Amino acid sequence: MVIAILFVTFLLVLGGCGNKPLSNTNDDAVVTNTAGQTVANTSNEAVQNTNVVVGTNNVPESKDYGIDFTASYLGEKKFIAEGTTDLPVGAKIKIKIHDEDYYKHDDDDMDWRLENLTFITDTIVIDSQTFSATLVGTDLSAPLKSENYTIEISFNPRAQSDKIKEIVGENGEYLEGSLIDNSISGLAMLETTTTIALN
């Protein structure tokens, strides 16, 4: 009888052990996070996904772009502008040459303006950190009757390719610095000028 009781007791104990793992591994020790990755739960508590995705909007950083240049008169109605810039390759800049007081004559007679005022313009594409442009006037565009001439170089985001607009913003949203010109509402351009004397 005693042997039978001990045998039954042994079976009951053995059956109870089958409901639990024999090792001390915690059920929460290995879990799967929301990214589908298996990770170790060293704290024996449920693991939360703390991964943070940064820059999902891919918004470019604003940048202070520079344009530095010098200009000179070569004779025979030829001007040259040479300089450096960190604008991205493929950017287009416009160069204008005109009388220093050109815009003071906006209301003057058109025939008089054509006879007396100089206005030369050209657009070049930046292909490196240095640039050089020679602008040649005609008898009509460059009567050269003034002593001093202004050379303007400007960068208009709206006149750029889609690739450049992605970098600087269609309206120059990502442009900053001392060359910013906000004279046109809703548009940030870069503009820099210098003046030279012919005599």
Image (tube, rainbow, N blue to C red):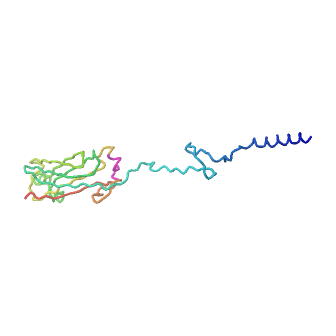
Q: Residue furthest right?
A: 1
Kindly identify the residue that appears in the image at 65 percent across and 47 percent down. 28
Q: Give the x, y percent position of residue 14.
A: 79, 41
Q: Give the x, y percent position of residue 122.
A: 19, 47
Q: Residue furthest front?
A: 3
Residue placed most toward the observer, 148 or 29: 29
Q: Is residue 49 left or right of residue 72?
A: right
Residue placed most toward the observer, 103 or 122: 122
The magenta-colored residue range is 164-173
Quadrant (top left, top right, bottom left, bottom right) of the C terminus: bottom left
Kindly identify the residue that appears in the image at 15 percent across and 54 percent down. 71
Q: Is residue 189 left or right of residue 81?
A: right
Magenta stretch holds residue 170: yes
Quadrant (top left, top right, bottom left, bottom right) of the N terminus: top right
Q: Quadrant of residue 63?
A: bottom left
Kindly identify the residue that appears in the image at 42 percent across and 48 percent down. 58
Residue placed most toward the observer, 183 or 83: 83
Residue placed most toward the observer, 135 or 85: 85
Q: Give the x, y percent position of residue 91.
A: 27, 47
Q: Is residue 170 left or right of residue 28?
A: left
Q: Give the x, y percent position of residue 126.
A: 24, 46
Q: How many marks on residues?
A: 0
Kindly identify the residue that appears in the image at 11 percent across and 59 percent down. 197
Magenta stretch holds residue 95: no
